[in-house]
Amino acid sequence: MTAHWKFASRVFALSCLCLALLSPLAAQRHDVDIAVVVHPDTPVSNLSLSDVRKVFLGDRQYWSTNVPVVLLIRAPVARERDVVLKIIYQMSESQFKQYWIAKIFRAEAATAPKVVYSNDIANQLITAIPGAIAFVDSKDVRPGTKVLRVDGRLPGEPGYPLR
């Protein structure tokens, strides 16, 4: 066996080892709850799953008479977006896009949810924009945001619906 093949086989073995070590970490990531976070001054602390759905469908556009709901959603392929599409919207990615195009076309909403590309950006925008609401990995929740109870439960509690 040439030196090149020995090197290639060692790289392959090392790659397999790395994948084996990382696989449990990836599997654990799917067990993390998705937190519903809002601006700290938002006048709610508990929503039913049905009410969360109404908010994200754009059916509830104001928290109070002078505080509009500002929807933030992760970009496609983010785990948080997948969970939200499956559990909250109950739509595929293409259905989600068509839903918002139709809603805007019918003048039922001014804009679609704002797309954020990381949980860090979501946290920053939540603290900066009154009325903002987003979904973030519960391990990525930062100080300055308010985590909402969903059906009376916080992320990590038994029966929490957003996993």
Image (cartoon, rainbow, N blue to C red):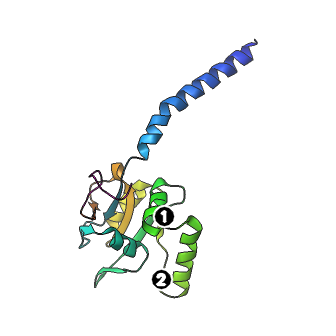
Q: Which residue is found at the position 54% from the left and 26% from the top?
A: 17
Residue 79 location in percent, x, y?
A: 47, 54
* Tag 2: amino acid: Ala
Secondary structure beneath disc 1?
A: helix
Q: Quadrant of residue 135?
A: bottom left
Q: Which residues are magenta?
A: 153-163
**Quadrant the C terminus occupies:** bottom left
Marks 2 & 1, CB-CB < 8 Å contact: no
Q: Which residue is found at the position 42% from the left and 66% from the top?
A: 88
Number of numbered markers: 2
Counting other residues with Cα less than 10 Å from the Cα at mark 1, is it few (<14), some (14-19), or many (20 or more)? Answer: some
Q: Is residue 9 above or below residue 83?
A: above
Q: Is residue 161 magenta?
A: yes
- Between the residue at mark 2 and the residue at mark 1, the CA separation in whole angstroms equals 21 Å
Residue 44 location in percent, x, y?
A: 24, 71
Q: Is residue 160 magenta?
A: yes
Secondary structure beneath disc 2?
A: loop
Residue denoted by label 1: 85
Residue 156 location in percent, x, y?
A: 29, 50
* Tag 1: amino acid: Leu
Residue denoted by label 2: 110
Q: Which residue is found at the position 54% from the left and 76% from the top?
A: 99
Does 135 sit left or right of 105 as displayed?
left
* Magenta stretch prevailing secondary structure: loop
Counting other residues with Cα less than 10 Å from the Cα at mark 2, is it few (<14), some (14-19), or many (20 or more)? Answer: few
Q: Is residue 52 above or below residue 24?
A: below
Q: Is residue 33 above or below residue 113?
A: above
Q: Earlier in the sequence, mark 2 or mark 1?
A: 1
**Quadrant the N terminus occupies:** top right
Does 87 sit left or right of 158 as displayed?
right
Seen from this angle, which residue lies furthest right?
2
